[in-house]
């Protein structure tokens, strides 16, 4: 019997032996082909029934009407994504027709997060033989992919050897449960046994010799498997199989993290190494791919003023529409959306547009005028001496290229598609580089110039792309296509690694991937230390998309919602109605989990277009945070009303920034109570204070008498305690919240909170460092609020901790004399 299988995706056909995973390449799961996908839907390759859909949506098993079983596994190691990027459109048991949609894919997200997009499509029916296969190269969904021949049904032959039964129980360890890789290992072992092997889990039974049957078990970490073996000497085989099940995947809970600066400085540079500045952490290996973005050509430098004004207005409108669409696209990350809004603001900049209009009125063409003014603004930013402003110069160049492309009708980016896994080397790159689908899947970025807090760096960190900047002119000599190692954690580029070093790094990368997968599998569980102390792991958020992603990563609530991001895209302060809707969406995305909303923290280094501030000689010590809100009570009252309207009172907690004395809390609580009564909300709402100054830390007991909770803002606390501006390029690396002086202030604040039995947390940058978790808990933190990415590793680390040991670690850290010494201590403790 022959069954035709049609391509479930459009893309490029690859031989199964070319799949970068031995389990698939060696046909342990089954024979077949692979596709590098170019379409965002997986469709049914034949008419039949859905047998299994992975809980994470990354794979699906189908059985044809003729009895052929097919496994479609989208990407490599995509189980580690936890379902992000996959939307299953069918359920097990459903009947489908050829071409029916099965899974919707977010290819950009998957490509940026997984080692490979290549998708194996495999025949898993025992005895089936593939007779015809599609040729390597392009294929469209629905094209003939391969033909499978099934053997005729045969009666099972009676065996002459004596048969007996063995029964054993095994528990799945930490990991992603039985997905494609462990199923393949179990199946390969079972097929080598001359007898029957059956595994039961949750009242579902599977023939262990069938990969697809094992997938239908839906077994996850912690599940108990009932293994039953029938054949000759079944006991020995059952014990062997249980041991394989118990091993799980690689399990080493140590998470890779950046080394302390002191340790970095102690590592001498060797031949073939370059030092650089870390912009996004991580480790990568891949071929060099040099990028040099060319300017858009301007054919004519003069023009008729009226026509050029119309031309410019039309081009700006088109680009604004494109940026707005990008920002509002559900598939756009929050970091990318924020940058799109920032670019819209640059495009609409009044001063820049006025200068352009003057040149156009004098006879300059619109492209020439925009480039002239934009380049002048770039130079002005670069010469300010303020690192953050200098890093925004590339954003002006980015807008210039995009706008001139609209004006001239030429491509804004002459860079060809970058090979997946390549290390991009350039002088500097605009943020739109990482938003281009042609550049998806790159391995890392090395810039000879650039900045560590640029928009490109933000996107790279959000996409887990290792990135080094300020590497110097030596990067220009890196040979195109030569493999290099980008070790952002050690701030190093290895320019000519040998085969042994390459193998070592690949092993390290595989281990990191396995560690992350193990941590993610347990991330949804509550976090409790080894000695039973409950520690809440929350997330810092700016949007509903942030909330959904953080919950998927294991966040137990929101420890900080930054409302200034909500204000950033407006020319006038947003209305109560609009804000309430935003808060309601975020609360719904958290599904009842606690939501701590910080009132507007504007001023200082956080200017807002919709709320112009008067010039201040020292903005960091000026009208910012709660000081500004009390001056503009109309803004504060609108915010508070929107919060109370949008979020259920049992879920809502409100936090005030830059509090320095109890009276500020009393004033806001009186206003909040009036608003609550006016809106008919009877239940009280928790009101807390951020501890961000030495003053607040030293009188935390007095503030705690008025507050329902306290939360450390470690970034500002470090800045004010050390008297170092974190925006100063010469000092920013030294503004370290692990400085013993800052740690002692945190300990003092924790003591003040404990005096009144107040809940005490931390939402600053060090809460996102898994290596700092033990120290922070030892200082008295009961809640850590992190960015989403490290949450699984933080929870994994906390589960290994003993509170008495954490207290001892905190005592030793506070007795040290520098932040580098503290980081070295944490590194030693991790070992």
Image (cartoon, grey):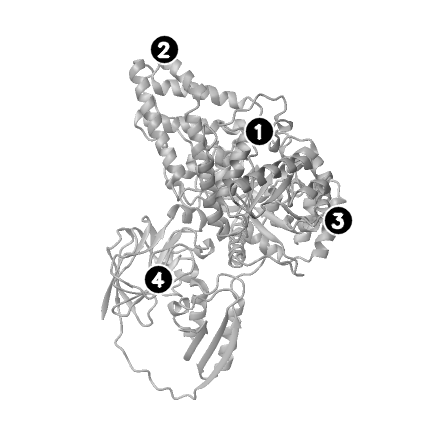
Circle nearer the N terminus (3, 2) = 2
CA gap, disc 1 and disc 3: 36 Å
Mark carried by residue 542: none
Residues under numbered marks 1 and 4 in contact, where contact means CB atoms less than 8 Å apart: no
49 or 412: nearer the viewer: 49
Tell me the quadrant of the picture where the C terminus can be found.
bottom right
Tell me the quadrant of the picture where the N terminus can be found.
bottom left
Query: Is label 4 in a helix, a strand or a loop?
Result: loop
Query: Is label 2 in a helix, a strand or a loop?
Result: loop
Query: Is label 1 in a helix, a strand or a loop?
Result: loop
Kindly report which numbered mark, 1 or 4, lies closer to the viewer in this rendering.
1
Q: Residues within 10 Å of mark 1 (few under 14, many from 20)?
A: many
Circle nearer the N terminus (1, 4) = 4
Residue 548 x, y percent position in the rendering: 47, 49
Residue beneath disc 4:
91
468 or 688: nearer the viewer: 688
Circle nearer the N terminus (1, 2) = 2
Horizontal side of 358 relative to 512 (left or right) equals left
Residue beneath disc 2:
362
Please give the name of the residue rendered at 54% of the width and 45% of the height, measured from the top-left corner.
787
Does any portion of residue 463 appear in the rendered image? no
Residue 569 x, y percent position in the rendering: 45, 32
Kindly report which numbered mark, 1 or 3, lies closer to the viewer in this rendering.
1
Residues under numbered marks 3 and 4 in contact, where contact means CB atoms less than 8 Å apart: no
Q: Residues within 10 Å of mark 4 (few under 14, many from 20)?
A: some
CA gap, disc 4 and disc 2: 66 Å
Residues under numbered marks 1 and 2 in contact, where contact means CB atoms less than 8 Å apart: no
Circle nearer the N terminus (4, 2) = 4
Mark carried by residue 811: 3
């Amino acid at each position: 019997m022959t069954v035709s299988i049609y391509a479930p995706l459009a893309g490029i056909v690859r031989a199964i032996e070319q799949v970068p995973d031995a389990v698939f390449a060696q046909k342990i799961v089954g024979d077949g082909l692979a596709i590098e996908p170019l379409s965002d839907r997986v469709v049914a390759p034949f008419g039949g029934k859905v047998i299994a859909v992975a809980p994470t949506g990354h794979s699906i098993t189908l059985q044809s009407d003729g009895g052929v079983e097919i496994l479609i596994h989208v990407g490599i190691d995509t189980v580690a994504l936890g379902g992000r990027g996959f939307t299953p459109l069918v359920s097990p048991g459903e009947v489908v027709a050829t071409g029916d949609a099965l899974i919707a894919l977010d290819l950009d997200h998957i490509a940026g997060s997984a080692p490979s997009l290549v998708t194996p499509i495999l025949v898993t029916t025992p005895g089936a033989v593939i007779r015809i296969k599609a040729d390597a190269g392009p294929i469209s969904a629905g094209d003939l992919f391969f033909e499978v021949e099934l053997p005729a049904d045969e009666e099972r032959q009676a065996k002459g050897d004596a048969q007996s039964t063995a029964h054993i129980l095994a528990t799945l360890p930490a990991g992603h449960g039985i997905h494609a890789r462990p199923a393949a290992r179990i199946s390969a072992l079972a097929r080598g046994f001359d007898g029957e092997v059956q595994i039961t889990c949750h009242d579902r039974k599977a023939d262990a010799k069938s990969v697809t049957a094992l997938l239908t078990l839906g077994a996850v970490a912690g599940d108990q498997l009932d293994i039953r073996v029938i054949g000759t000497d079944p006991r020995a085989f059952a014990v062997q199989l249980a041991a394989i099940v118990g091993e799980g995947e690689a399990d080493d809970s140590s998470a890779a993290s950046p080394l302390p600066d002191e340790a970095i400085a102690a590592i001498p540079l060797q031949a073939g190494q370059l030092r650089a500045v870390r912009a996004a952490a991580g480790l990568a290996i891949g071929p060099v791919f040099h990028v040099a973005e060319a300017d858009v050509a301007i054919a004519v430098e003069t023009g008729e003023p009226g026509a050029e004004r119309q031309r410019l207005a039309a081009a700006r409108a088109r680009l604004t529409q494109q940026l707005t669409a990008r920002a509002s696209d559900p598939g756009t990350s929050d970091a990318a959306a924020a940058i799109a809004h920032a670019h819209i603001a640059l495009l609409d900049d009044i001063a820049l547009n006025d200068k352009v209009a003057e040149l156009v009125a004098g006879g300059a063409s619109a492209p020439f005028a925009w480039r002239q003014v934009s380049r002048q603004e770039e130079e002005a930013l670069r010469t300010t001496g303020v690192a953050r402003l200098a890093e925004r110069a590339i954003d002006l160049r980015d807008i210039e290229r995009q706008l001139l492309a609209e004006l001239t009708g030429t491509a804004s980016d002459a860079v060809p598609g970058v090979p997946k896994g390549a290390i991009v080397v350039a002088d500097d790159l605009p943020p739109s580089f990482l938003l281009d689908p042609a550049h998806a899947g790159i391995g890392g970025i090395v810039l000879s110039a650039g900045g560590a807090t640029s928009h490109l760096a933000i996107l790279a960190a959000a996409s887990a792309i290792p990135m080094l900047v300020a590497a110097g002119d030596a990067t220009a000599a890196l040979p195109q296509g030569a493999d290099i190692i980008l070790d952002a954690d050690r701030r190093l580029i290895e320019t000519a690694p040998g085969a042994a070093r390459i193998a070592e790094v690949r092993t390290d990368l595989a281990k990191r991937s396995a560690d992350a997968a193990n941590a993610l599998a347990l991330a949804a569980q509550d976090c409790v230390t080894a000695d039973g102390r409950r520690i809440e792991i929350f997330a810092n958020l700016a949007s509903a998309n942030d909330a959904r992603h953080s919950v998927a990563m294991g966040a137990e609530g929101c420890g900080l919602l930054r409302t200034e991001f909500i204000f950033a895209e407006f020319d006038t302060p947003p209305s109560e109605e609009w804000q309430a809707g935003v808060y309601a969406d975020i609360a719904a995305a958290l599904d009842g989990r606690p939501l701590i909303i910080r009132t507007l923290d504007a001023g200082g280094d956080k200017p807002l277009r919709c709320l112009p501030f008067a010039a201040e000689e020292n903005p960091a010590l000026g009208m910012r945070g709660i000081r500004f809100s009390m001056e503009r009570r109309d803004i504060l009252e609108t915010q508070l009303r929107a919060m109370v309207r949008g979020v259920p009172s049992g879920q809502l907690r409100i936090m005030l920034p830059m509090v320095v004395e109890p009276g500020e809390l009393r004033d806001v609580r009186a206003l909040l109570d009036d608003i609550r009564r006016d809106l008919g909300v009877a239940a009280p709402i928790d009101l807390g204070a951020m501890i961000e100054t030495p003053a607040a830390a030293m009188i935390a007991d007095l503030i705690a008498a008025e507050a329902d909770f306290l939360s450390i803002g470690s970034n500002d606390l470090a800045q004010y305690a050390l008297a170092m501006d974190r925006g100063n390029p010469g000092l920013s690396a030294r503004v370290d919240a692990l400085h013993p002086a800052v740690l002692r202030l945190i300990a003092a604040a924790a003591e003040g909170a404990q005096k009144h039995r107040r809940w005490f947390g931390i939402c600053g940058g060090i809460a996102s460092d898994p290596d700092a978790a033990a120290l922070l808990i030892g200082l008295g933190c009961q809640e850590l609020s992190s960015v989403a990415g490290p949450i699984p590793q933080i929870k994994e680390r906390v589960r290994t901790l003993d509170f008495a040991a954490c207290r001892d670690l905190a005592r030793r850290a506070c007795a040290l004399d520098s932040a580098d010494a503290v980081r070295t201590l944490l590194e030693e403790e991790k070992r």
